[in-house]
Image: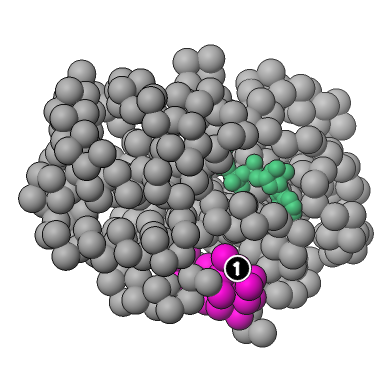
Amino acid sequence: MKIYKTNVKNINSRYSILIGFGAINQLKKNIRSVCPNTKKIALIFDKKIPNRMLNKVKRQIRDYKIFVYKYSVNENLKSFEKVNSLNESLLAKNFNRNDLLIAVGGGVIGDFAGFAASILKRGVNFINLPSTLLAQVDSSIGGKTGVNSKKGKNLIGTFYQPKLVISELEFLKSLPRREIICGFAEILKHSFISDKKFFKWIEKNTKKIINNKDYKIINSAIFKSCKIKISFVQKDEKEKGDRAILNFGHTFAHGIEAASNFSKKINHGEAVLIGMYLASKLSKDKNICSKKTLGKIINFYKENNLPNDLKQFSLKNKLDKIIELMKNDKKNVDSKISLILLKRIGKTTKPGRIKMTPKQIKLSLKKFT
Ligand SMILES: NC(=O)c1ccc[n+]([C@@H]2O[C@H](COP(=O)([O-])OP(=O)(O)OC[C@H]3O[C@@H](n4cnc5c(N)ncnc54)[C@H](O)[C@@H]3O)[C@@H](O)[C@H]2O)c1
């Protein structure tokens, strides 16, 4: 199977993303070229990933002094205290700026390890080996790192670019279907916000991705999705403008996750799928998209049995709370809720153009329920 390679260029950095079965075998060679002075490597590893994958990674870095940190993963790992404890341990081992942290895990491990790397001695080398579909198509690209605060998700963090990303498809073998759907939500989002042709391809291939784990198709979907995300983050590294389009569906999703206290009852991808569905309905109600576009989206969700209803997660009576919680989104700069809406498949409104009060959103969505 093909190993794809693509590059991300920012003002002060440039790194490659490798995608495919066996891409991990290129880790050794790449570390030598992007981190030539590294002596020590800390592997920040998700405990749920099978040990055979840990051994594969270790074989690639056996010429270095290796320290393995294994974590049970949930959102609580993304805390300042846990980052501090990791960094104190690395300082005790004399890690310096030439040394390297490698994240092996999903978005939680990537955000956690990337943040630790960004503040340790004001920045040590960082490589990301994303192990969930969501991390491969989304969180490993673009350099956002961070932890949660008592006041909300991802409120403390940095922009810090990795030296390399390797999306090894073999990681996905042990990934549960629910997590595959989570990553699929972001792939679908990328098509909605910028590529109608890609949406048509997704229409044909969704079942192969989420039901059959067809790796050839997944490989192409990850590559295409990465290219779209890169096109946004390269133009706007620090999210001052169009990068915010990537938040399509996410303002609702954050409200949904917060209203369910970030419980396992609903995961991020499921919340994003419902969020995009609600944002599309709102788009139609405000005459930003046509009835035909909304109909296409409704049919697509129905045909693929994708989550689209708060009722499925016993959140139906929480719509008012969800909308109130959307006010806390860090992209809002006043009391109104800033939203990205859909003009048609492949095109959204510009960031900052649509602002609504919670009451306006409620009235609009209630027409559809
Ligand atoms: N930095 C960014 O730009 C960005 C973008 C999107 C999301 N995020 C963050 O990413 C996080 C969500 O990421 P995620 O969906 O990858 O969640 P995650 O890291 O929690 O992983 C999901 C689940 O899969 C398990 N897992 C991971 N890899 C596995 C494997 N190969 N086999 C079996 N199980 C495996 C994990 O232990 C966990 O239970 C959130 O914290 C979110 O805020 C960050």
Quadrant of picture, ligand 1: top right
Residue 110 visible in the current orientation: no
Q: Residue at x 60, y 68 (%)?
A: 211
In this view, the residue in front, 300 or 14, is 300
Left or right: residue 255 compared with residue 149: left
Provide residue 338's location: percent of width, then percent of height: 22, 33
Corner quadrant of residue 169 = bottom right
| Type of amino acid at the residue the image marks with label 1 | Asn
Q: Quadrant of the N terminus?
A: bottom right
Where 85 sits versus 236, above or below? above
Name the magenta segment's main secondary structure.
helix
| Numbered label tally | 1
Which residues fall within the magenta stretch? 208-226
| Label 1 sits on residue | 211
> Which color scheme did the rendering employ for the protein?
one colour
Left or right: residue 332 compared with residue 84: left
Q: Is mark 1 within 8 Å of ligand 1?
A: no
Corner quadrant of residue 31 = bottom right
Q: Quadrant of the C terminus?
A: top left
In this view, the residue in front, 69 or 221, is 221
Mark 1 lies on a secondary structure that is loop
Q: Residue at x 40, y 48 (%)?
A: 308
